[in-house]
Image (cartoon, rainbow, N blue to C red):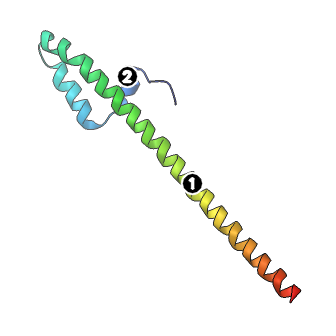
């Protein structure tokens, strides 16, 4: 899995709702902002990891679908060859 991006890169990849939450928290008074920012950064990192995991799963499923198509093709070709050889033996 790739390295965690910097804060600037991370923000560019976050959903709009989380970006809005960043803006709202940054507008709060300092004492409230410092209390909420660690949780917000954890939320951002978790969101990034989940998106990365989802992308990895989607890529794996695409590869599995392609592999299944090749396997079905190979199975059908093998059956045709078997049937042709059976006819030659009969």
> Tag 2's secondary structure?
helix
Residue occupied by mark 1: 64
Residue 11 x, y percent position in the rendering: 34, 27
The residue sitting at the front extreme is: 90
Residue appearing at x 36%, y 26% in the figure:
45
Q: Percent from the top left, x then y, of residue 67? A: 62, 57
In what quadrant of the picture does the C terminus appear? Answer: bottom right
From the viewer's side, name the closer residue of 42 and 89.
89
Residues under numbered marks 2 and 1 in contact, where contact means CB atoms less than 8 Å apart: no
Where residue 22 appears, as percent x and y from the top left, is 23, 25
Instruction: Identify the image quadrant of residue 10.
Output: top left
Which residue occupies the foreground of this view, 5 or 86? 86
Instruction: Pick whichever of labels 2 and 1 is earlier in the sequence.
Output: 2
For residue 38, which quarter of the picture?
Answer: top left
Q: Is residue 65 above or below residue 39?
A: below
Q: Is residue 13 visible?
A: no
Q: Name which residue lies at 11% across and 13% down.
A: 29
């Amino acid at each position: 899995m790739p390295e965690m991006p910097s804060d600037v890169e991370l923000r560019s990849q976050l959903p709009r709702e989380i970006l809005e939450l960043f803006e709202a928290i940054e507008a709060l008074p300092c004492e409230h902002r410092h209390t909420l920012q660690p949780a917000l950064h954890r939320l951002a990192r978790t969101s990034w990891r989940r998106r990365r995991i989802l992308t990895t799963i989607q890529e794996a499923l695409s590869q599995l679908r392609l592999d299944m198509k090749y396997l079905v093709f190979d199975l059908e070709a093998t059956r045709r060859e078997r049937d042709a050889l059976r006819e030659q033996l009969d």
